[in-house]
Each structure stands twice: as structure tokens, then as C-alpha cells.
Amino acid sequence: MSLMRPIFVLTALLFLRASASAQPAAMMRAVVVHEYGAPEVLKYEDAPRPEPKENELLVRVIACGVNPADPLVISGRLAKEFGTHLPLIPGYDVAGIVEKSGTKVTQFKKGDAVYGYALFGGGWAEYAVLAENEAAIKPESASFVEAAAVPLAALTAWQSLIDVAKLSAGQTVLIHGGSGGVGSFAVQIAKARGARVIATASTANQDLLKQLGADVTIDYTKTKFEDVVKDVDVVLDTVGRDTIARSYAVVKKGGIITTIASRPDPAQLEKYEIRGTSIWSKPDGNELAEITKLIEAGKIKPIVGQVMPLTDAVKASRQAETHHTRGKLVLKIAEEPKS
Ligand SMILES: NC(=O)c1ccc[n+]([C@@H]2O[C@H](COP(=O)([O-])OP(=O)(O)OC[C@H]3O[C@@H](n4cnc5c(N)ncnc54)[C@H](OP(=O)(O)O)[C@@H]3O)[C@@H](O)[C@H]2O)c1
């Protein structure tokens, strides 16, 4: 009896301590993949709110962009390249307000309006984390929905044209798929750089190519670009399939093809004495800040073709699979805060 009593007291104390420290995890609404497959595997449900690490920001997400990579991630086809594991929350393009910043974050504070390309996704949720070096202050002249259209697509265009092709003023660039997510930024970035832009899209998007500032527009349903284009300095291929195969001959000697949707054929590059490379874009807060300046200067306008609620994530993923999105598709997750 005398031994039982201290054991009982100790057990009771341990129980009380455990229940005091076991805080229930903060939850949020999110779109979650529990098994790889078609977009219909997506579940809109409660999920634990992420905690930012020391170099990360916790962002209350107002809007998140949709990219063709999302259905690929959901299907499991990019699992190896992206190092994803289940369960996962898709969504690379986060635009929102800093809720909390990690102890080593120096450039952003609670309440800042930010946007960024989250390398590991997670944006199709009420809260997401961005590493400090993935984020930039959101352009004041853009809404959160417009800002969410920018990071992945604009960085892909920037890294293809500026970092890799070193596009300069006076050069001519042919942009395949100029009306899509990447292409609509590429046309505007190339124009801001002082280049002459030739861009392709279908009949319905010829007006958009002109609005973006393309000098020459080609309707690929009516005209073969190789019949009317020659001697360009740079080709940006966002389409893949046979488009790259037909592009080698239109590049001038010493010119370059950058592709985000295919791989250049070394034999063709050698034959035409041109360079070629395929790229994987990456998050870069500094480059995003450069893009922000162009948005604030009115030289880049994000083109938001469609806005859907987070509950329409399946429909949005199906649209991303079509490869015929006009500008960007954005999921609106919360109301735009009043400024
Ligand atoms: N490697 C990377 O880092 C990276 C990054 C981003 C994207 N990507 C890939 O790049 C591709 C494009 O991405 P995105 O976000 O720009 O896609 P998107 O928003 O779906 O846009 C695709 C655009 O291509 C146009 N298009 C379709 N077929 C065409 C053709 N035969 N000739 C010319 N234009 C054509 C479409 O215009 P119409 O509707 O008028 O046909 C559409 O506007 C996707 O395959 C994506 O997965 C790769």
C-alpha cells in the first residue's frame, strides 16, 4: 500500500504534465494528395499548419498560381526530380501576408505582403512556407491574384532569356507559346530588354500576343513558323514536341535555343552551328525582385486568364493539363486584404 501511493502520484503528475504540453496542432484548409494519380485524387480537407524553420516565412496565402507542373506532381511523374513524398500539398506560386518569420529571417517581417516560388510547393492551402531566399516583396501595383501568377512562370522566362540566352537589345527572339504562362512573361521581358519579338499562339490568342507587345505574331494553326522566320538570335521553346525539331533551321549561326519543354538534339545543334540547352527553373528572390521592378514600372503586366476558388483545384489541374491556358490560372484562397 505504501509503495502504491507514490507510484499513483507520479503517474498522475506525468499525465497532467503531458496534457499541459500537448498543444493541439494548428490546422488549416488545404488541398492534399494522399495517393498519386489523376487530379481527382485531390482532397480538400483539414491539414496541419506548417511551422516555419529559422530561415523561412509562414505566409497566410491569399492566392496561389497553377502550373502545368502541378498535375505532373499530383500524378507522381515528377516525384523523383522534385523529391516529393506523400502526403503533399501542390502549389508553387505563393502570394500572401507574412504571419510569422523564422529566427534567422532578416528581410521580411510579420505583416509584409510577399510572393515567391516555393520549391517544395504547399501553396494550395491557407498557410504555406517560403524560404527567405525564395521570397520578394509583392509589387504594390499588382493584386495578390496577379502576384500569384508571377513567380514560377516569370522566373522561368527570366532564367531562359536573361541568364541562359543572354538576350540583349536589338536581338530577335522567337517565343513559341507566347500566350501561355511562361510565354506571356517571356514576350514582355524580351520587349523590356529591347529585343524584337516574334511570338506564336493559336488564332484565339493573336490579340493577346499583340497586347503583350510582340512585333510579329504567328498563328500556328494557319502558318508554319519556319516558312516565315529566319536568322533569329534566340528561340525560347515552351511547347516541345515537334516545335524544337523545326526550330534549329531558323536560328542564325552562333544563336541559341533554350527549351523548357524538351531537349535539344546535339547533332542538329552541331549541323546548324548553334547552341541549345534545356532548363529547369529555380526559385530566386533576387531575380523576383528584379521582375517586381518591371511590374512596378508598368513593363510587365501579369495576365490572369482565369481565377478559381481553392475548392476547384481538380478543375484547375485539369485545365493546366491542356497546355492551352491563356496567361495564368490562379486559385484565390482568401479575400484580398483592404489596403
Ligand atoms: N523546365 C521548366 O523549368 C519549366 C517551367 C515552367 C513550365 N515548364 C513547361 O513548359 C511548358 C509551358 O508552360 P506554361 O506554364 O507556359 O504552359 P501554359 O500556360 O499551358 O501555356 C502553353 C501555351 O502554349 C501555346 N501552345 C500550345 N500549343 C502550341 C503550339 N503548337 N505552338 C505554339 N504555341 C502553342 C498555348 O496557346 P494556344 O492556346 O493559343 O494554343 C498556351 O498559351 C509546359 O510543358 C510546362 O510543364 C517547364
Image (cartoon, grey):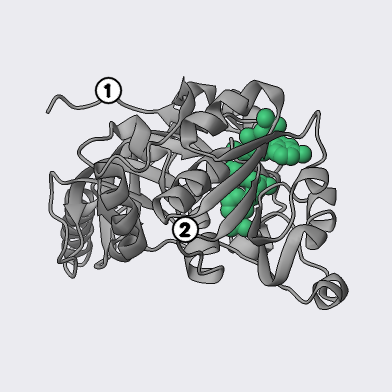
Whole-percent x, y for residue 86 in the image: 58, 51
Q: Cα distance, mark 1 to mark 2?
A: 30 Å
Q: Could you tell me which residue is drawn at 64 percent across and 51 percent down?
A: 174
Q: Amino acid at mark 2?
A: Trp
Identify the disc placed on residue 335: 1
Quarter of the rendered structure image containing ligand 1: top right
Residue named by callout 2: 158
Q: Secondary structure at mark 1?
A: loop
Q: Could you tell me which residue is drawn at 37 percent across and 42 percent down?
A: 300
Q: Are marks 1 and 2 in contact (CB under 8 Å)?
A: no
Whole-percent x, y for residue 93 in the image: 43, 45
Identify the disc placed on residue 205: none
Whole-percent x, y for residue 77 in the image: 72, 52
Judging depth in this view, the residue of 226 and 31 nearest the camera is: 226
Graded by Cα atoms within 10 Å as few (under 14), some (14 to 19) or many (20 or more), the crowding at tag 1 reads few
Q: Amino acid at mark 1?
A: Glu
Q: Could you tell me which residue is drawn at 52 percent across and 56 percent down?
A: 156
Q: Quadrant of the C terminus?
A: top left
Q: Is residue 70 above or below residue 7?
A: above
Q: Quadrant of the N terminus?
A: bottom left
Whole-percent x, y for residue 98 in the image: 20, 47
Quadrant housing residue 284: bottom left
Judging depth in this view, the residue of 75 and 13 nearest the camera is: 75
Q: Is residue 125 visible?
A: no
Could you tell whether 14 is left or right of 221 in the image? left
